[in-house]
């Protein structure tokens, strides 16, 4: 937002569009009012999920098996970390230096082998009623960010409780919670002149035209007096005020204004999408948003690898990860360090994972239609065992939770379900995960029907 004055009054037709978001026609004030009905209070805790959709391989990241037969052993080598007994891939040297500041879960598992089914299970804790191998399923239950938005209710400053950076998962929907609990997509913070898409006003109205805030409020008051002949708008003042505070106030705009960060810190995170996504996520968590879901698919607009889905095809296991690993290592390690340096590691919980792992046995392919550069090396979908990184939230760090068999096929000790991970997340957010929601049929639906917080981390 600029501080110069508007050049003239805002025409009523344009004024009527002020505050309308890309949320199916809901106005911002409608959204704030509906959220306020869902809950009260703004707890101080936040969760940042670095969402690696596509399924990163456990054997190429945090659960390497260097002594496995060659048909299973990956192309990379493990390295020692600061924590005795915790090893992971050689391309994570920054994480290795701060391994005492996070824990690794090696025994996540479920039964869904398609991308959308696995994603729905991990993000919502509810398995799809009918698994879909074509990966086109959409959730019939809200994900944990939507539930956090519902349970937390609206913030008085207008900051959304659930934010997708730079975009949110596409396979989940708020369903019976209502559209107002859909994630607010921030847009890509690496683009020139970045500003979050959904906070911009309708086409043709930019922030500079709303800088005479007193004039804007005066016009709004006049507009209400003209139309409120039967008192139908009575009682909406608080929500209208909050809507315009979000659009014209400085606090929410400042939270999204990544340009306020020092250039040296932006460099430290990395001037790539994942680095700047992580930096923006930290700003939003620090400002009080409940859940920030970082889209960690393509590390840049120019990347050939739009997910972590490394089959033996165009997503070559080696080539793709050699592009991803340095940027992921830089971004996630800096996020963890930055949060700790700001004494926010009890307030903010960081989780990094995907929807499943990869097959223990390597797959090979000599050619791929329309592609050059074979032979191809990869792994297919595997929900039987996968890994996650977890940091902060006042939990115990520097641990490895669980162990898998010699080929990373399935858990041997301390198995962890997605419901257990979500119970840990809800505990941090102060949300009672046994609480019942109400579906479209008026029937109670528990937030989680199973799962307990991961005891080794408590």
Image (cartoon, rainbow, N blue to C red):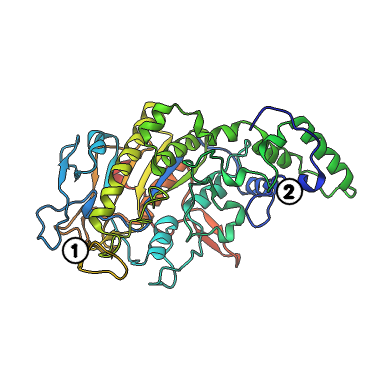
Residue 47's x, y, as percent?
44, 42
Q: Are marks 1 and 2 in contact (CB under 8 Å)?
A: no
Residue in front for this viewpoint, 103 or 379: 379
N-terminal of the pair, mark 1 or mark 2, is 2
Disc 1 residue crowd, few under 14, some 14–19, many 20+, Cα 10 Å: some
Residue 151's x, y, as percent?
55, 48
Give me the residue at 44% from left, 71% from top: 129
**In the shown orientation, is residue 64 left or right of residue 266?**
left
SS at mark 2?
Answer: loop
Residue 443's x, y, as percent?
57, 65
State which quadrant residue 368 falls in: bottom left
Disc 2 residue crowd, few under 14, some 14–19, many 20+, Cα 10 Å: some
Q: Is residue 257 depicted above or below 169 in this figure?
A: above
User: Which residue is the site of mark 2?
Assistant: 17
Give me the residue at 65% from left, 49% from top: 31
Residue 184's x, y, as percent?
55, 48
Residue in front for this viewpoint, 236 or 321: 321
**In the shown orientation, is residue 284 left or right of residue 54?**
right
User: Which residue is the site of mark 1?
Assistant: 362
**In the shown orientation, is residue 296 left or right of residue 380?**
right
Give me the residue at 53% from left, 56% from top: 436
């Amino acid at each position: 937002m600029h501080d110069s004055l508007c050049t003239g009054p805002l025409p009523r037709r344009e004024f009527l569009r002020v505050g309308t978001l890309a949320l199916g026609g809901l106005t911002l004030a409608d959204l704030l009012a509906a959220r306020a009905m869902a809950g009260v209070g703004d707890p101080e805790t936040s969760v940042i999920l670095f969402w690696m959709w596509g399924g990163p391989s456990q054997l190429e990241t945090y659960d390497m098996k260097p002594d496995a037969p060659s048909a299973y052993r990956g192309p990379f080598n493990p390295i020692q970390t600061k924590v005795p007994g915790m090893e992971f891939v050689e391309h994570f040297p920054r994480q290795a230096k701060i391994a005492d500041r996070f824990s690794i879960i090696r025994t996540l598992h479920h039964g869904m082998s398609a991308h959308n089914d696995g994603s729905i299970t991990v993000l919502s804790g509810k398995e799809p009623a009918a698994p879909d191998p074509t990966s086109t399923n959409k959730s019939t239950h809200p994900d944990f960010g939507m539930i956090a938005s519902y349970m937390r209710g609206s913030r008085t400053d207008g900051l959304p409780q659930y934010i997708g950076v730079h975009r949110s998962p596409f396979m989940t929907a708020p369903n019976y919670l209502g559209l107002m609990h859909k994630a607010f997509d921030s847009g890509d913070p690496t683009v020139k002149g970045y500003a979050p898409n959904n906070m911009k006003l309708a086409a043709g109205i930019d922030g500079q035209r709303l800088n005479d805030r007193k004039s804007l409020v005066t016009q709004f008051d006049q507009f209400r007096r003209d139309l409120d002949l039967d008192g139908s708008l009575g009682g909406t003042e608080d929500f209208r005020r909050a809507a315009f505070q979000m659009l014209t106030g400085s606090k929410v705009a400042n939270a999204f204004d990544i340009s306020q960060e020092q250039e040296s810190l932006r460099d430290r995170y990395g001037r790539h999408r994942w680095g700047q996504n992580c930096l923006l996520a930290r700003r939003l968590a620090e400002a009080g948003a409940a859940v920030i879901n970082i889209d960690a698919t393509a590390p840049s607009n120019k990347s050939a690898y739009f997910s972590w889905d490394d089959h033996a095809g165009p997503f070559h296991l080696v080539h793709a990860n050699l592009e991803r690993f340095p940027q992921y290592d830089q971004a996630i390690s800096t996020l963890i360090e930055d949060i700790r340096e700001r004494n926010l590691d009890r307030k903010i919980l960081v989780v990094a994972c995907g929807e499943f792992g990869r097959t223990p046995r390597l797959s090979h392919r000599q050619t791929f239609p329309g592609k050059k550069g074979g032979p191809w090396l990869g792994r297919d979908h595997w929900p039987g065992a996968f890994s996650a990184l977890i940091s902060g939230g006042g939990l115990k760090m520097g641990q490895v939770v669980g162990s898998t068999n010699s080929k990373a096929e399935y858990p041997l000790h301390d198995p962890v379900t997605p419901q257990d991970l979500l119970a840990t997340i809800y505990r941090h957010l102060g949300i009672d995960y046994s609480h019942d929601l109400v579906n479209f049929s008026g029937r109670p639906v528990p937030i989680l029907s199973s799962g307990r917080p991961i005891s080794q981390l408590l």
